Image (cartoon, grey):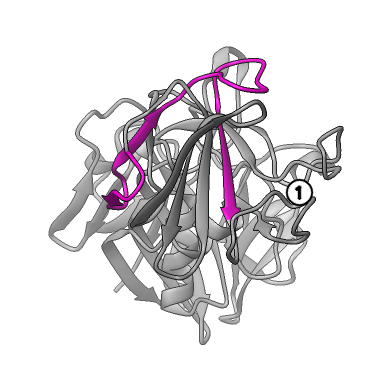
Amino acid sequence: MYPFKKFTITCPYGKKGSWQCGYHTGTDLVGTDDNVMAVAAGTVTTVSFSKSYGNNVVIHHDDDTASRYAHLALAKVKTGDKVSEGQTVGIQGSTGNSTGKHLHLEIFKKLPVVYPSVFPGNTMNPVEYLDAHSKKYTEYLCRQVLPLDLGVAIVDQQAWNIGIANFMTGGFFGKEAGGRTYPAVHLLDSGKLLEKMPGTQFTQPTLYTTFDGKIGIIMTNDPSSVPKVKSAISGIAVCGDLDYDYMKQGWDNSWNYDTVHALLGIKGGLVYCCMVKGGYADLKSYAADKRFEKAIKLDGGGSAVCRDGNKLLYKCPTENRRINSIVMWDK
């Protein structure tokens, strides 16, 4: 798990600079909550202060990796303590070589825990490590749908009032003036283009179906160019040979935006309509567990709704956003 529930990454792993070994050996994060949590269970082997790291804690984990939490205001554990995943090990601070309050997180892929200039190649990208070790999600829906049975629509009211038996929320991922999100960049149904944002900057991972029953997810800024296209909707890549870099963070700049998301996957010529709770890393784990060939994330958060027949499987309790697009299917 990540050391904060909500955070912003301010300096990535591997950035070139004036550090002793020539690159940034960890990831800098600024949490909205100052409690720093252990990324995995383990044993505290070091609680110390140094000019570079300030107050820092090192934890050895059961897989022979280790994590360091640096620049803490103070440590909340002592050497020899057994800690569980998610336990508070310190308070975010700005001690040592630091210009502002943040956490410097390092992951060591083999022991001993020493600075990379002494032991080159000993650290790894914390985000990649945590993404690979994150498998925490809750599935509300996973419905197999034939390509010809899939459709999309734009509605101008709350989605649970539209009178369609089988549906889930569609996509939002962009910003209007004032910070509001706008509906799916590309939306097409029954061969008719419903929504398209102009310009190549809106080339997005887009799921499409065709009138002859084919299906795929491609990078495009014009889904109507797909031969015999029936339906299409854009999203954010979760798996497959797609662009992963677009908007991995949530609306609040949290990398692991832990909420309920709609997700569309493809496998074996079928569409899988899914509603899953979890952050971006969790959705990647979910797609891997389902063995999707490709998958995209649609909307979530305050507009997440899904209904399967007579069952309302999920409806966001806050109802803080109007729904502009939905995915629907026939049984």
Q: Magenta: predominant secondary structure element?
A: loop
The magenta segment is 78-107
Using the image as rendered, state which of residue 262 and residue 108 is in the foreground: 108
Whether residue 295 appears in this view of the structure is yes
Taking the image as shown, residue 157 lies to the left or right of residue 67, namely left
Look at 56% across and 12% down and name the residue there.
178
Taking the image as shown, residue 202 lies to the left or right of residue 94, namely right
Measuring from the top left, give residue 159's x and y in whole percent. Answer: 30, 41
Direction top: furthest residue: 178
Direction bottom: furthest residue: 268
Placement of the C terminus among the 4 image quadrants: bottom left
Using the image as rendered, state which of residue 137 and residue 87 is in the foreground: 87
Measuring from the top left, give residue 89's x and y in whole percent. Answer: 35, 37
Q: Amino acid at mark 1?
A: Thr
Name the image quarter holding residue 110.
bottom right
Q: Is 106 included in the stretch rendered in magenta?
A: yes
Q: Is 47 included in the stretch rendered in magenta?
A: no
Taking the image as shown, residue 7 lies to the left or right of residue 177, namely left
Measuring from the top left, give residue 46's x and y in whole percent. Answer: 46, 45
Whether residue 234 appears in this view of the structure is no
Look at 74% across and 66% down and name the residue there.
226
Measuring from the top left, give residue 232's x and y in whole percent. Answer: 59, 59
At numbered mark 1, what does the secondary structure look like: helix, strand or loop? Answer: loop
Residue topped by disc 1: 203
Look at 37% across and 51% down and name the residue there.
278
Up-down: is 282 above or below 102? below
Up-down: is 273 above or below 24? below
